[in-house]
Structure formats: C-alpha cells, structure tokens
Image: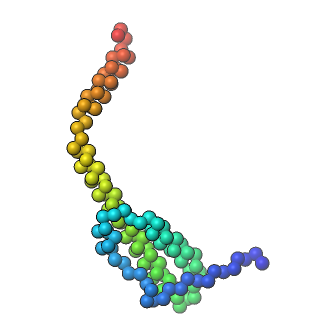
Amino acid sequence: MGSAPSESPITVKPESRMMYSPGPMENSGHAPDMERLESKVDELERLTDSLGNVPDEEVVDVLSHAVGLLREINAGIEAGLQYAREGSREMDEILARVNFGPFDEALEEIEEQERSAGEPGT
C-alpha cells in the first residue's frame, strides 16, 4: 500500500569490474570531463541506494564496483587539480612578465591626492 516498489538491485559481474589506471587521466593535460565524473558519482549513489537490496552473496562484488568507481572519481579529481595547478603556473608566468610600474605609480598619485585633499588648509 504505502511502500514503494523495490528497485531491482544492481549486480556486477566479476569480469566487468573497473580497474584503476591513473596514467591516462593524470597525464592528459586537459580539463577533466566533469560530465563523466558526475555520471560516476550518480552511478555510485545508485549503487549505494541499492546496496540494501543486494543478496549477501553479491555484496562483495557490489562493494568492489563501488571501490572502482571511487578510484575513478578520485583520479578525475586529481586530474582536475593538476589541470588547475598548470593553469595557475601559466598565470604566474604571465603576471611575472607584466610591468605594473606605471599602474603602481598612478595608484600612488591617486592615493596621495586623496590624502592631501583630506588635510585641513588645502
């Protein structure tokens, strides 16, 4: 009556388990595929939600699949961090070549004008 129909548990065949391979993602030099990461997180959430309905003999396989998903998610996050570090380094290199001298001088002049405008007798 008031109970929702139970979803069929997600089963994982041992031969379909994901293997962790950090090399391709970490060395890609490209932004991580956020849609792919989001789909992995969604899959992990579905797997977690269905864990209570999994027969005892399949729990180890389901948990192994969950661990594989977590490894993939972690590898994607690490790739994103590496991509951000590279972008930050590039920005630092660009900023190191910019001459801010004229800007700093103009800013100092403005600040001096503001200070002198606030002094009595001017």
Q: Is residue 60 visible?
A: no
Q: Is residue 114 above or below residue 35?
A: above
Residue 93, given in percent of the width and then of the height, sits at 24, 49
Q: Is residue 96 above or below residue 9?
A: above
Residue 119, given in percent of the width and then of the height, sits at 36, 14
Residue 22, given in percent of the width and then of the height, sits at 33, 73
At a point 76% along the width and 75% down the height, the residue shown is: 2
The residue at the far bottom in this view is 57
Give 102 or 112, whichever is nearer the viewer.
102
Q: Is residue 94 visible?
A: yes
At a point 51% along the width and 74% down the height, the residue shown is: 43
Q: Quadrant of residue 14?
A: bottom left
Q: Is residue 6 above or below residue 92?
A: below
The residue at the far right in this view is 1
Residue 83, given in percent of the width and then of the height, sits at 33, 60
Q: Would you say 38 lies left or right of 29 here?
A: right
At a point 35% along the width and 10% down the height, the residue shown is: 122
Give 60 or 10, whichever is nearer the viewer.
10
Q: Quadrant of residue 33?
A: bottom left
The residue at the far top in this view is 121
Figure quadrant of the N terminus:
bottom right
Query: How many tags in the picture?
Result: 0
